[in-house]
Image: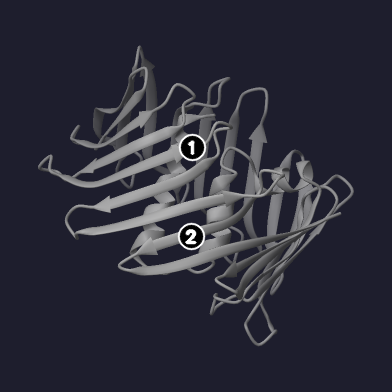
């Protein structure tokens, strides 16, 4: 499994440890299937619905069609959007997305059109073009654009990746002018990033190259723009993240995280130590006979929460 995807799981769980996040049971589910889209996982497992509980109280749910696409999501802990609905066409592409307030009234939404390999996103409220996205498979180039109320592009990003989908170049434009560009280089076991800054006239004003990552056989080091080490990840022989350490700008260790896996490489325990706060958080994971997560226990500050998961199949 890709190391970056594994690392993202634990970065996200760090946020969970600091405060109660809306729909944490659902978020943990999505992180545990890291490396796969939720829709891909739903299709492979023939899922019709997944329901998430905080202790015994309903927290949220996701419903899918036979292709694994979302058709409805509900989240009781979200004070802004309580329900969302989705529609898809015969080509399995999204054509509509609606979000509803806690009182059941329509809040906002979008509908989609597909032209010349591009996805066009319009606001349901006024039918104005809001976003356009394209992807050229042969060249691994994608674009992302946003528009104002008169149809003018106000933001545009262009991304270029190699055949293995590693970042090569990203360029960002505002009001038809480039304002920053990032160039990525991979030399031996090191990754470098060059940041090129432009002024309002599109003239280059600065260029700085810095060490971004250093990869070893079972270790990955991460550096800031000033080449200060801020995180070290350790992996086992199967590329599972087993330890993560974070440092402040003075090099003082601020947090440690440890992960344990069973013989089938499923995560069974994750422990976080916040060294500056004298706080420890422990997540323990249990799975059903089909290897689906069925229960997660979170312990911190003498408290315990149990997240439970229920599945319905097509």
Along the viewing direction, whichever of 5 and 268 lies nearer the viewer? 268
Along the viewing direction, whichever of 228 and 126 lies nearer the viewer? 228
In the figure, 69 relative to 277: above or below? above
**Disc 1 marks which residue?**
261
Q: Which mark is residue 133?
A: none
Tell me which corner region of the image, top left, top right, bottom left or bottom right, holds residue 73.
bottom right
Q: How busy is the neighbourhood of tag 1: few (under 14 within 10 Å), some, or many (20 plus)? A: some
Q: Secondary structure at mark 1?
A: strand
Tell me which corner region of the image, top left, top right, bottom left or bottom right, holds residue 236.
top left
Left or right: residue 111 compared with residue 140: right
Q: Are marks 1 and 2 in contact (CB under 8 Å)?
A: no
Q: Is residue 313 visible?
A: yes
Q: Is residue 225 visible?
A: no
Tell me which corner region of the image, top left, top right, bottom left or bottom right, holds residue 55.
bottom right
**Where residue 241 sits: x, y (%)?**
42, 34
**Disc 2 marks which residue?**
297
Question: In the current view of this chain or complex, which residue is farthest to the right?
Answer: 90
> What residue is drawn where x is 12% and y is 43%?
252
Q: How busy is the neighbourhood of tag 2: few (under 14 within 10 Å), some, or many (20 plus)? A: some
Alpha-carbon distance for marks 1 and 2? 16 Å
Along the viewing direction, whichever of 313 and 12 lies nearer the viewer? 313
**Where residue 120 sits: x, y (%)?**
70, 52
> What residue is drawn where x is 60% and y is 27%?
140
**Where residue 307 sits: x, y (%)?**
55, 64
Q: Secondary structure at mark 2?
A: strand
């Amino acid at each position: 499994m890709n190391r970056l995807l594994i690392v993202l799981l634990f970065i996200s769980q760090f946020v969970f440890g600091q405060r109660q996040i809306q729909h944490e049971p659902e978020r943990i589910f999505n992180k545990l299937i890291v490396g796969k889209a939720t829709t891909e996982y739903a299709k492979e497992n023939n899922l019709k619905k997944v329901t998430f509980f905080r202790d015994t109280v309903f927290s949220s749910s996701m419903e899918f069609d036979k292709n694994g696409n979302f058709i409805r999501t509900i989240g009781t802990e979200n004070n802004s959007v309580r329900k969302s609905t989705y529609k898809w066409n015969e080509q399995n592409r999204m054509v509509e997305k609606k979000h509803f307030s806690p009182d059941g009234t329509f809040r906002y939404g979008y509908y989609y059109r597909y032209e010349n390999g591009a996805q066009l996103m319009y606001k349901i409220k006024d039918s104005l073009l809001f976003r356009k996205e394209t992807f050229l498979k042969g060249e691994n180039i994608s674009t992302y654009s946003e528009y104002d109320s008169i149809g003018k592009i106000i933001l545009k990003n262009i991304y270029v990746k190699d055949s293995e989908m590693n970042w090569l170049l990203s360029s960002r434009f505002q009001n038809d002018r480039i304002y920053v560009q990032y160039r990525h280089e991979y030399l031996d076991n090191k990754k470098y990033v060059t940041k090129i800054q432009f002024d309002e006239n599109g003239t280059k004003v600065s260029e700085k190259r810095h060490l971004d990552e250093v990869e070893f056989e079972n270790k990955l080091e991460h550096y800031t723009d000033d080449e200060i080490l801020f995180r070290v990840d350790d992996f086992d022989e199967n590329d599972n993240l087993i330890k993560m350490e974070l440092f402040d700008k003075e090099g003082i260790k601020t947090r440690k995280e440890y992960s344990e896996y069973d013989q089938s490489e499923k995560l069974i325990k994750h422990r976080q130590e916040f060294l500056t706060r004298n706080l420890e958080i422990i997540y323990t994971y249990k799975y059903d006979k089909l290897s689906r997560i069925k229960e997660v226990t979170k312990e911190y500050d003498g408290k315990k929460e149990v997240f439970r998961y229920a599945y319905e199949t097509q």
